[in-house]
Amino acid sequence: MSESATPTFPKHLLDFRDWSRPQVESLLETAQMMQEVLSRPVKKVPALTGFTVATVFFEPSTRTRLSFELAARRMSADVVSFASATSSTTKGETYKDTLRTLDQMGIDAYILRVDAAGVCHQAFGWLQKPIINAGDGWRAHPTQALLDAFTLREKLGSLEGKKIAIVGDILHSRVARSNAELLPMLGASVVACGPATLLPGHLIGASLTTNLKEALSEADAVMVLRLQKERMDKGLLPSLPEYIAGYQVTEERLRWAKPQAPLLHPGPMNRDVELEGSLADTPRSLVERQVANGQAVRMAVLYHLLVGKKS
Amino acid sequence: MKGEILIKNAKLVDGRGEHGQADLLIGEGHILSLAGGDAPTVLDAAGRVLSPGFFDPHAHLREPGQEVKEDLKSGLTAAARGGYTDVVSMPNTSPVVDSPEVVRALKEKAARIGQARLHPAAALTQGQEGKVLSEARLLREAGAVMLTDDGRTNEDAGVLAQGLQYAASWGLLVSVHAEDAGLRRGGVMHEGEVSFRLGLPGNTGFAEAARIARDLEIVRYVVQGPGALSLEPGRSLLHVQHLSTRRGLELLRQAKQAGLPVSTEVGPHHLTLTDTHLESLNPIYKVAPPLRTQADVEALLKGLLDGTIDCIGTDHAPHTQDEKELDMLRAPFGIPNIEVCWPLLYTELVLKRGFPLPTLLERFTDGPRRLLGFPPIHLREGAEASLVLWSPADERPVEPHTFASKAKYSPWAGWVLRGWPALTLVEGRVVYAQTVQV
């Protein structure tokens, strides 16, 4: 192959610590091409023929798993699925043993979701195979951040100098963490906002505030996070009405942001909790677009990790 | 003069300082002479240092009930290889060590094993449940040297106050795992920039400081309140285990300056590792209290130097490799270290940072002995021959597969250290001799 502008890629997507801006840009360009594939009547290319991809989900998820599986199938990969509900982990088998067992079955890449931060890193150490982190605890959800970036660029153009507000339970959010890693890499500034008990002490890549007006003020886009109801049980939030009063993103509060600033949500939404329900159905909501773009982005990730030029 | 072992050309260093070179004649469990003599076994210790045997006030030997992690034989053998002649075992086993019968059985078994000597700590409260006090008088008679609910935190201040009063009346030290359970929450690493970025639940350093502050007031109540006890002067009443924070150290320094009978220890991991090691997301670094920041390490080193910290306690906490390969949330807390503690701190503190050798030795020997009421061992005629000969020039990497401990992994694997023990004697009897030795 001739020297091209295409950068080499890490062997995994665990988070963005090992990724550079040119690598991410190149990945997002590939996603653009994948989106074109998805607009064809026959949405299938042979790029990953002969590869076997496993989705290994130790935590329940439907959308992310479906999105990954479709992404793999549209590129002609064989896909096997392992979900903890039907797995041996309930019988006490460790992640390491489960993954090593699966690895005897000739799998080329793993898409992993777990409830504990760091398992994807550990898995890469155990297996030395491409690992795509589909969410590990509170830590990272890199393909979500990539699809958010892709969707934002589709709407806003370059993210250089753009202010992106993320609102909700920042402390426990892997989506917020991955976006705080990725969006500043693409030139954006990130403001993360939530109740004091749901904000980390600090977060590299983002400024933090408990003041919603300050966060939304002049924002170019607003990302709303799902509020997990169990936060109330842990005493981190007094009540749902209390949260709504302080932090629900409403049409009125959105006026603090730039006119027509788009609205994103990683889903699944609690309508009328973290955001005013009707907002999701307005043209400024990119929620459905995020889901559609998710598939293209995941195709690009799989392509780069399995057949793209590797470092 | 006739003895059993003659150690020639040994450089003598103990907690008081350096005492030049001598030919040590050992017999009948004691140092018979510093001026040589006849013995059937003669060792040339040229280039090596002879010191009093190390005394560990805090180790988890896991027996009874958790022998898959460690047992008395593996743990006390590991200790002897680490230069330790004496080990205090923690009672958070299954069942908990809270009865005189179990203490006696452990001591008898350890004596048969014949490695480092065992001094069991017993539970402060029955079953370590924090409710009913254990039998301090009978436990002491059976050989318990300390009472502690270590492994758990003493949430009920009233029970701790009563425990201190009662234990003190029988001359027993109480040690505490000082972390406020509410503030600590489910933290698996130090709460700070690294934990926030990694998305791991954090355990704030203030959980330790807050608990120390409370416990110091409890000590004040016990020694200054109505019906206050009169204590043996110089003896500690409350011992804060595994100190990890700068703020905790400040509180203890002030308390000691105010004359409160308190003491503390620090573990080798809290002096050589920080929370940045968790960037690897490897649970091998998961320990309670957690690895803190470099600022904490620097403060602890100062405290170790100025004597605010009385001693090194390993908190040797073996688990199986499988357990430590669980994820960061599920893997158990604990770092095994008893075999590397001395070479690690000799290399990292004395050689790399100029920490005074006699002071470090004091914290391994006289310091822990003093707080438990054991007389010091100093290198002179008539002293008990519980000694360690170690090699400042012996430089090699930490190789966990060679450990005697059942926990054959280490956060320091591959670190190149000097000062490895070559010979450990308990009352004149060789319990460990490095194979290349003699």
Image (cartoon, coloured by chain):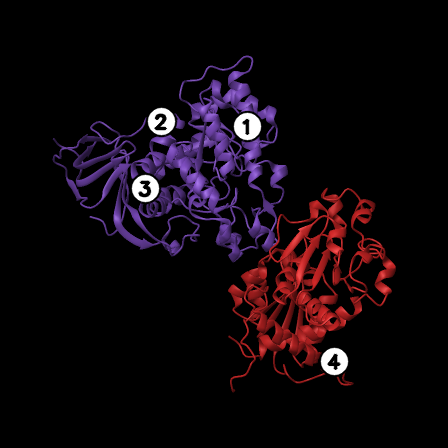
Chain colours: A red, B purple
Q: Amino acid at mark 4?
A: Leu
Q: Amino acid at mark 1?
A: Asp
Q: Which mark is residue B198?
A: none
Residue occupying the point 57% across, 53% down: B328
Quadrant of the image occupied by residue A278: bottom right
Q: Chain of mark 4?
A: A
Q: Chain of mark 3?
A: B
- Label 3: which residue? B83
- Label 1: which residue? B215
Classify mark 2: helix, strand or loop. Answer: loop
- Label 2: which residue? B374
Q: CA distance from mark 4 to mark 1?
A: 65 Å
Q: In the image, are marks 4 and 1 on the same chain?
A: no
Q: CA distance from mark 2 to mark 4?
A: 78 Å
Q: Residues within 10 Å of mark 3 (few under 14, many from 20)?
A: many
Q: CA distance from mark 1 to mark 2?
A: 25 Å
Viewer-closest of B389 and A213: A213
| Disc with the residue nearer the chain's start (1 vs 3) | 3
